[in-house]
Image (spheres, helix red, strand yellow):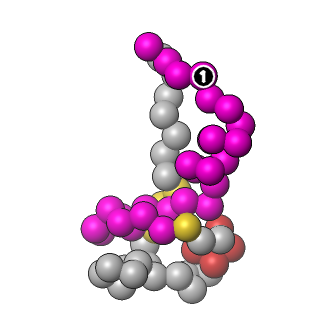
């Protein structure tokens, strides 16, 4: 059972959202800052961040 996604909702949920690979906390920041390792996790201080994964359509 899939939901119809409006582009505004997809952008709000996934745009510039990153997840810490150590503690799984979420933060919103810029891709260039993440690639340059200028951003660290607020919770644990780890610099390894990944973009939030989008759900697959089955």
The quarter of the picture where the N terminus appears is: top left
Q: Residue at image x 45%, y 82%? A: 40
Quarter assignment of residue 25: bottom left
Q: How many marks?
A: 1
In this picture, residue 32 sits left or right of residue 48: right
Q: Is residue 20 inside the magenta stretch?
A: yes
Q: Which residues are magenta?
A: 1-27
Q: Residue at image x 30%, y 81%? A: 44
In this picture, residue 38 sits left or right of residue 32: left
* Residue 35 in view (yes/no): no
In this picture, residue 42 sits left or right of residue 29: left
Crowd band around label 1 with a 10 angstrom C-alpha radius: few (<14), some (14–19), many (20+): few
Q: Is residue 17 inside the magenta stretch?
A: yes
Q: Position of residue 24 (x, y in %)?
A: 32, 62
For mark 1, give the secondary structure.
loop
Quarter assignment of residue 8: top right
> Looking at this view, is 50 or 13 the one in front?
13
> Looking at this view, is 14 or 47 the one in front?
14
């Amino acid at each position: 059972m899939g939901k119809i996604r409006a582009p505004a909702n997809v952008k709000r949920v996934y745009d510039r959202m990153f997840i810490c690979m150590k503690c799984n906390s979420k933060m919103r920041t810029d891709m260039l800052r993440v690639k340059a390792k200028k951003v660290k996790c607020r919770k644990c201080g780890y610099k390894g961040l990944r973009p939030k994964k989008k759900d697959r359509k089955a």
